Amino acid sequence: MSANLKKLRPYDQAPRTRRELVPNAPDSAATLWLAVAVVWFVVATGLGALWLLQEIFPQATFTWHAAFPFNLKIWVVLQPDRMLAGFVNAVVYGWLTNAAIGAIWFITPRVTGRPLVSNLGANVALGLWNLAVLLGLATIFMGILPDHGLLSEFTLPVDALGVLAILMVNGVFWGSVARGLGPSTYISVLYFGIGLLAFLGLFTLNAALELITFADPWPLLLNDAYARALEAYWLLGAAVGTLYYVVPRASGNPLYSGGLALLGWLTWLVLSIVAALAALVDPSVPYLLTTLGSVGTMLLLLPAFLVTANLLLTLRGRWSLLLRFGGLSMALIALAFLVMATIIQAIGGLRSVIAYTGATEWAVGALVYTGLGTYTFAFLALGAHAFPRLLRRASGFGSLTDAAQWLTFAGVAIAGAGLMFSGIAHGSLLAQAAGPDVIASTLVWFRLGAVAGMGLLALGALAFLLDLFLMYTAGEPAVYVTTAPPPDAAATPATS
């Protein structure tokens, strides 16, 4: 008996496995970037709901201050304009950018047949980028930044941190695809490549412009042009590249037409920079430039229709799969929002519409349909496909997954409509020179609808986060087989 109770000596025990400070395992970058993105999804939609509540009750501001050594004092004032800036930046830089890069880390190895050159580098970039976003939001709420549009210009140290992170992301991506590029390179890689280069160039240029002093209204005009170009090249490019992966993979069909895909990519590549000129609406800007921008914005309908038609034709013979909740149904919702949002942007790019709704909630409503509609559902569709494979768990928890999808869809539809109708009504009241009290009392009903929609959207984001947590902690273990790259990667993505 005493022998059985013999105390084990240290060298009788198996050595403990040392965990790496920064994960470097295969697919760790995709897992971490996507998981952090879902957390940002909850934060961003929560900030949006708080902003709309403050629009209805502007007196409900929150002030916090603290004193530190060396006579350092920090004041945080959560008022409507700062809350709006925090919401927009959390959506674009927090939720959508993290989700887009996570999607790139998941898709790229599967369509090139090569692993990422460095999951370690990608995960270091994750820490740098999210630190930059957190510091940027802090400067917004502290009132350090000037009011130059929806997407804030962060301070130079924060911008430098962000540029370093994006540079590292580009390095990992191009180092990974360089060995897999060829005549049969899948279309998603082309969208991701241009999107990442544009993201690096635009973010760096926007940071560099802070060193130059411009007379009004150029700071606002340049910020609007930057926001449009960033959305068109980075967010739209990453979302379309993601949909080109999810739809063929989830349906089991090859992509309908590589030629249509390449034509859509070329038209998107050319028209996106032209469309950014539509933001330069000012008497100091030549009329020809802004007109060219408006035409470019309307012509963006062409690549949107090409992408939608190509992916819908990919579903031929597999339409019954859309009746199931999951990646394919969310991809279809993303395509529907893509067409609708592109039409809305084409209308909003007209000079007369900009003059009528420029100082209203119209732009935020359009952002809800594009950012929280098209791009969000594209990345959620990827998450529905990727997370079970990354976590090696069975997908979804039935009613919770269904509720998350419906809450998100209803929230986007209601919040976007409420904000856009509020913008139209606001523009009409401003044209009639109505007083602030009349404007506030008239718009309160539209804003109540928008608050309800944003609340549903926040609940949907929280349900997605809970679904992910339950999948990781209580999901049934599952094995997913990795398939070899097909001989013609331009027609069918290599997936797992």
Image: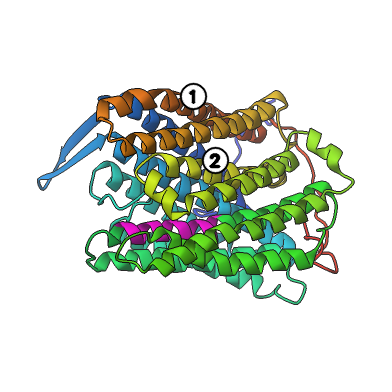
Report the residue marked by disc 2: 38
Q: Is mark 1 on a helix, strand or loop?
A: helix
Residue 452, label in figure: 1
Crowding at label 2, few (<14), some or many (≥20) Cα neighbours within 10 Å?
many
- From where the camera sits, is residue 496 visible? no
Q: In this view, does 95 lie above or below 449?
A: below
Q: Is residue 2 above or below residue 102?
A: above
Sequence-first disc among 1 and 2 = 2
Q: Where is residue 189 in the image (x, y as percent from the top left)?
A: 66, 65
Magenta-drawn stretch, dominant element (helix, strand or loop)? helix
- Which quarter of the figure is the N terminus placed in? top right
Magenta part of the chain: 220-235
Q: Which of 134 and 205 is in front in this view?
A: 205
Q: Which of marks 1 and 2 is in front?
A: 1
Quick check: is 229 in the magenta stretch?
yes
Q: In this view, does 212 lie to the left or right of 152?
A: left
Q: In this view, does 43 lie to the left or right of 379?
A: left
